[in-house]
Image (cartoon, rainbow, N blue to C red):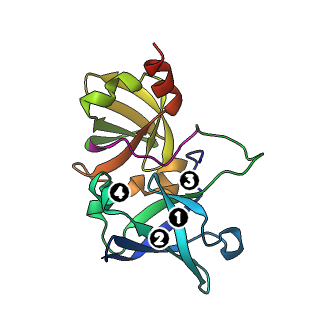
Amino acid sequence: MFSGIIENRGVVREFIKLKDYRLVLDTDLNFKDIKKGSSVCCNGVCLTVTSKKRLSKKTKLSFDVSNETVSCTNFNQIKIGDTINIEKSLRVGDEISGHFVFGHIDETAVLVSLKKRGGSYELNFKIPKKLRKFIAKKGSVAINGISLTVNKIKQDYISLNIIPYTWNKTNLCKLRVGDRINLEVDMLARYVTQSR
């Protein structure tokens, strides 16, 4: 489980098809803070560290990625050099500054517009119709693993405001109109909706 607060990023060094896929990232994570078998949220997807290597100023992490994960996330668009949002799994007693993020992607969503609003940015995404009932104004969603608040929702579109800190500390600053992001709805909203 994760909080959706991104404190680290990784750069894709390898993404190759074997029986499944292997993803290799150079990360900002401290070598001692991560171990083989650890869960790490990569662009919102919960992955297991299969190996790690100490670099001079970085930590190289490898992950196995299933064909299923690639087919239902934006991992099918990964390129060498891409920036990935990463977050270590929560420990008991950690601060929950965002919301509970499970690392299970519901769908991808398309960025349809991006506008600068003062120092912040307004991002609008077209979301799949089947997820609309789980998303509410001022509710939470995870976009590429980032815990964000929905400012507006209209039909199949959601609008999010990104403050400068989040813009600069995540890979949202790399997004272009037409790009796909990984979307996870708030699990509490899912439970409430299904209990009716």
Q: Position of residue 56 (x, y in %)?
A: 61, 87
Q: Name the amino acid type tagged 1.
A: Thr
Q: Position of residue 93 (x, y in %)?
A: 78, 45
Please name the residue that numbered disc 1 is placed on.
Answer: 48
Which residue is rendered at x = 42% and y = 65% of the image? 83
Please name the residue that numbered disc 4 is placed on.
Answer: 69
Q: Could you give the CA–CA distance between mark 1 and mark 3, rounded to whole angstroms?
A: 18 Å
N-terminal of the pair, mark 3 or mark 2, is 3
SS at badge 2? strand
Q: Is the residue marked by circle 4 packed among few (<14), some (14-19), or many (20+) residues within 10 Å? A: some
SS at badge 4? helix
Q: Name the amino acid type tagged 3.
A: Ile
The answer to which of 139 and 177 lies nearer the viewer is 139
Q: Which mark is residue 63?
A: 2
Reply above or below: 48 against 16. Answer: above
N-terminal of the pair, mark 2 or mark 4, is 2
Q: Is the residue marked by circle 2 packed among few (<14), some (14-19), or many (20+) residues within 10 Å? A: many
Please name the residue that numbered disc 3 is placed on.
Answer: 6
